[in-house]
Image (spheres, rainbow, N blue to C red):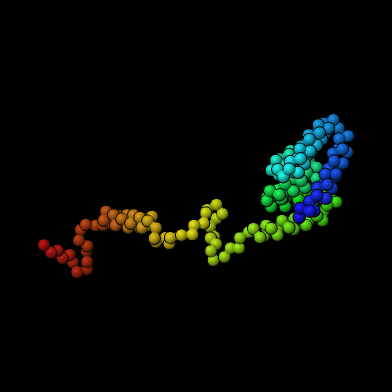
Amino acid sequence: MTARRGPILLAVAVSLLVALGAGARTAHAEDAATRAARRHFTKGEKLFALGRFDDALIEYEKAFEARPLPAFLFNIGQCHRNLGNVDQAIFSYRKYLREQPDADNREAVERLIEELEAEQARQQPVLDPRLTDPAPAGRPRRANRKPIYARWWFWGGVAAVAGAGAGTYLLTRDASVPATDLGNVVFD
């Protein structure tokens, strides 16, 4: 994978410099943006060559903000790939191919995406469906779940309901002797 990176970076760098040079002749406002993009790109290239991918990523992103050229997206993807940010690398490469559908390095970028997707699939753990919890994503899964009847608050609730029921019964019952068809029998 690293052997192919040199020609790819060279092709992108050349196309980027050509695009920056052609874009520099448009308007005065774009001249400042082009100079800023070129400055950040050059700094990003030096940092990338030194293996300081996190710093290079920042510079490439600044260059893209100054002048949103598709080639910067490729460089951003390369930084993410080298940093191990698989999702972000795939995103950047796909965005690069959408913005530059006739890219010279399209096949190479598509191979990089395939490799990263394979790596992404290897990184995802295989879950046993019997162990998965249907709980919402925000709630962490607990391995030692007690059944509801083994929790203190369940029995506290049962006791409160039973106490309330007994108290209601005692307060509302009639204290006199109940009437029957046989008549009232009172034992003294």
> What residue is at 70 percent from the left and 40 percent from the top?
55
> 70 or 40: which is nearer to us?
40
In percent of width and height, residue 77 lies at 74, 48
Q: Tell me where residue 151 appears, x and y as whole percent.
A: 39, 58
- Seen in the image, is 22 located left or right of residue 56? right
Asked if residue 32 can be seen in this view, the reply is: yes
Residue sticking out furthest to the left: 188
Q: Residue furthest top?
A: 28
| 18, above or below 143, in the image | above
Front residue of 106/153: it is 106
Q: Quadrant of the C terminus?
A: bottom left
Q: Quadrant of residue 46?
A: top right
Q: How many marks?
A: 0
Which one is in front, 91 or 139? 91
The answer to whether residue 98 is left or right of residue 184 is right
Q: Residue at x 22, y 62 (%)?
A: 178
Quadrant assignment for the N terminus: bottom right
Residue located 81% across and 31% down the image: 32
Quick check: 46 above or below 4? above
Image coordinates of residue 108 in percent, x first then y, are 80, 55
Q: State whether residue 98 appears in this view.
A: no
Q: Is residue 102 left or right of residue 89?
A: right
